[in-house]
Image (cartoon, rainbow, N blue to C red):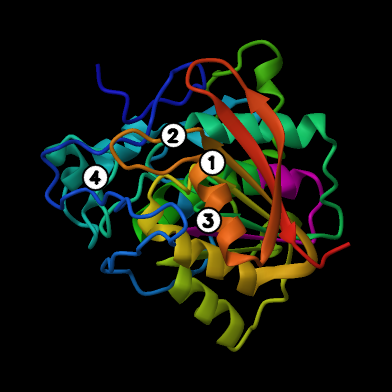
Amino acid sequence: MDFRFNFFPDEDESKEPNAHNETEPCSPTHEHPETRLPEKKVCIKAAKEHYIPADVTKVLENKVLETVSGLCYVNMSVVELTCQDGTHEEDIVSKSVSSHSDLIPGVYEGGLKIWECTYDLMDFLSEAKIQFANKTVLDLGCGAGLLGIVALRGNAEKVHFQDYNSTVIEEITMPNVVANCINDGSKADSEDDRKNIKPPSKKRKKSECLPDKLTRCRFFSGGWSEISQLLLSSSKPCSKYDLILTSETIYNPDYYGALHDTLAQLLAKNGRVYLASKVHYFGVGGGTYLFEKFLEERKVFKSSIVKEVEEGLKRFILEIAFKDST
């Protein structure tokens, strides 16, 4: 059974690359426990910003919209079909299909799928009543962008979305955000959580202003270190983020250094990171405890487990903050 485009959190899955990937999966080198994890060099995509067209209906052309947990999202199986023609420069769909893998290091990093820990973090944000009003929020490694959309629903002042692949941003993240802003978070799920909803009318005038919530959003693709440089040095530099939300981004220890430095550069002094992950990612080597150990060694952040999910493979929500934060 192919789980590459599974949307529901009741599946027990790990980000485990197939042994026959085009690129050999990265694996951690195990040295003395007191030494830092070595970091392999991976070809990293350059960062760029993606802009919403004036006619927002174009973002939703050829998309099938559904809802889950009260949020609109595009059916990714349909996106897969429409992206297999090779017209997208990255061509990540056909590469993912041909290699039978959800991960091709340095090429495709899993953004075509909603991973189960995303739902864990969404539940936590609701249960903990995390406040987004007047906050600047980054959905890091956003994929479908559901975490950022939750923040947008909570009246965040700014929400920025980042994914490694530009195809993911243009074909999945941006359409999801636009659909939720236009449909104002469809309430259809009260009767059927996966009920199809209609795209907005194509009669919308091109000159019409973007919905207010869309004006609060920016979209970026590329590697984490490149994204940090772009955000901090662009003509429209970003303020540091009050909240950074990220799910299943610590599966590969080779990326820990880049992730750590990105968080250190972009998080506000008293900001918080909420990170959702599995205890261990088989085949890739990462996991919650390993990342906590990495943070301890770097001595920049403090972390604590704020939620534990026992169903299937154990999963956690980590709260991360600067050691000197209040």
Up/down of 78 relative to 36, above or below: above
Residue to which mark 4 is pinned: 93
In the rendered structure, are the residues bearing label 2 and label 3 in contact, judged by CB atoms less than 8 Å apart?
A: no
Quarter of the image for the N terminus: give it: top left
**Whole-number angstrom distance, CA of label 4 to CA of label 2:** 26 Å
Neighbour tally class for label 4: few under 14, some 14-19, many 20 plus, Cα within 10 Å: many
Residue 280 is tagged as 2
On the image, the x and y values in percent for residue 204 come to: 59, 52
Whether the magenta-drawn stretch holds residue 123 is answered as no
On the image, the x and y values in percent for residue 3 come to: 32, 24
Quarter of the image for the C terminus: give it: bottom right
> Is residue 205 at least partly visible in the picture?
no
2 or 3: mark nearer the eye: 3
Up/down of 310 relative to 63, above or below: above
Amino acid type, callout 1? Tyr
Residue 294 is tagged as 3
- Give the residues in magenta: 149-164
